Image: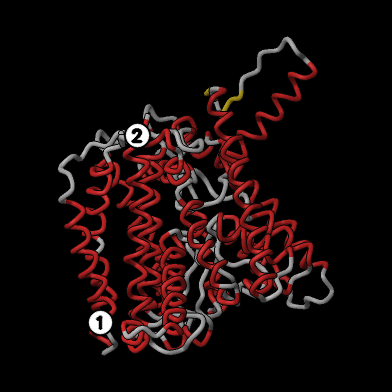
Amino acid sequence: MRIRVDWRSSCSLTGTVLKWLSIPLTLPLAIGVYEGADVFPFFGAILVTILLGVALEQLSDERDLRQREAFLMVALTWLGVALVGAIPFFLTGINASTESAFYNPIFDLIAGDVATLVIVLSAFVDSLFESMSGLTTTGATIMSGWDFENQSRAILFWRQLIQWLGGLGILIVAIGLLSNLMVGGAQLMETETQTQNVTKLTPEIERTARLIWGLYVGLTLAAAGTFYALHLLGLAPNMDLFNAVSHALTSVSTAGFSPEGESVGAFSPSVQWAVIPFMLFGATNFVLLYYIAQGDLERPYRSEELRFYVGTIVVFATIVCLVLLLDSELEQGLEPTLRHGLFNVISIMTTTGYASTNFDLWTPAATYILFLGMFVGGMAGSTTCSIKAIRWLVIFKSLSRNLFVSVHPQAVRPVRLGESVIDEETVTDIFSYVLLAFLLFFLLTIFVIVDGARAGPAITQFEALGASASIFFNIGPAFGIAGPLENYAAFPLSTRAVMVIMMWIGRIEILPVLVLLLPAYWQS
């Protein structure tokens, strides 16, 4: 078989990304040095990522990627960064099945201890789970409350930072690459933002990346300043500088990790209100934010996707708040009810995954609405995950058009977004993507139920549905054993391993991974 994909170029560019990953790794290293914590895990990760990155770079000098090589590069980069990002977790000893570090088990493994092999394998899967969850901005964790209390700020900060890097990475990939590759309807960003070429807001992709970087960093600094200001004003006593920066990193990236075991529920109501707008900004099309920053304040009013995105949040939040207000068992007052209802709806629908309270205890009507919100997502060209608002908008418009044509068979009625016509191939792509996404989601659900029945613990159907949706659509918390104040450590090791793969596939819009499985991709 002759391989017709220039995999060397893809691996070479992946190596470049891995090499530069050593720079952000120095930040938790510095925190560890300052606090006197164990910094070996970060030295090890830096050494591995530099050596691996340089080695891969030597495979090719080619920097221009064709479509096939771009697919491979995206898939390999996300996987490679997750693997390197898992090294600090692995060496620190974050593992659901043991409270001990892994230095001695590793040495025992070399000696041939089979029992230790199982421990180390579990350690590897859990470390990769935490890293992949961070990089894909999923926010699902295998850490329990005990783990949060006993981890150094260095390792906790790495959890936050890898999510911020993942949010920035998906922005650059989605706007600069996936839109050009016509993946899953991402090309609709061009129509909605009314640009000549969304891939090139500026002449080169490098300048586009710098533009996105500026917006992203600016929002992050604004979030950190806002949160810390609440601390200085005495409105958030435990929102110190570390927590302010940590939550800024994962608010704007719509990621959801928190150094606190109770998530944002550990902070005062003023913090919870302050987090809401930054989750919304992170889930907004950054191309749209760019034009707003340039002073074009009329563009948001012309964006159908923005109106649909905001309107959907308003509808879901209103329903949840009304359900909570009518619940006689929740006697918490008007303001807390509205705050928790609005916060958790926005957190779920923007795929951030923060929790201001244990919504797992809400009435079933409210939790079912949250479950439906998992499938919505934010806008295209944002840090968010899930289906995304623009796809749902096109689907609803297409269904409306089909109903009209069924009554008026001779009518010619194209699907429009604003004044632009969406071509039928794009509409078909949208339906295909959503169908494929739901198919994979249901397959994961079946696996979670079957594997849980095999290995334990017993997992209810709704728990499996919630966990599968949360993992595949990169949301984070779910319900029951994966609830907002729980973690995913209770799932069997095999389930957690499959979840790692599904987070990877879901985050990069399915196609860049699945296309690699086709023989025609490599041969024709």
Q: Mark 1 highlights which residue?
A: 40
Crowding at dot 1, Cα within 10 Å, few <14 / some 14-19 / many 20+, comes out as some
* Amino acid type for the residue under numbered disc 1: Phe
Up the image or down, 375 lies above or below 126; here it is above
Which sits in the foreground, 232 or 135?
Answer: 135
Q: Secondary structure at mark 1?
A: helix
Q: Is residue 165 left or right of residue 375?
A: left
Q: Secondary structure at mark 2?
A: helix
The answer to whether mark 2 and mark 1 are in CB contact below 8 A is no
Quarter holding residue 456: bottom right
Up the image or down, 427 lies above or below 121; here it is above
In three-dimensional space, the C-alpha distance between marks 2 and 1, rounded to whole angstroms, equals: 39 Å
Q: Which mark is residue 228?
A: none
Q: Position of residue 493 (x, y in %)?
A: 54, 72
Is residue 185 shown to the viewer in this render? yes
* Amino acid type for the residue under numbered disc 2: Gln
Q: Position of residue 366 (x, y in %)?
A: 75, 63
Up the image or down, 64 lies above or below 464; here it is above
Which sits in the foreground, 65 or 393?
Answer: 65
Q: Which image quadrant: the N terminus?
A: top left
Q: Position of residue 459 (x, y in %)?
A: 70, 70
Q: Which mark is residue 67?
A: 2
Quarter holding residue 265: bottom right
Q: Position of residue 373 (x, y in %)?
A: 65, 54
Quarter holding residue 86: bottom left
Q: Residue at x 78, y 78 (%)?
A: 331
Is residue 200 shown to the viewer in this render? no
Q: Is residue 445 left or right of residue 51?
A: right
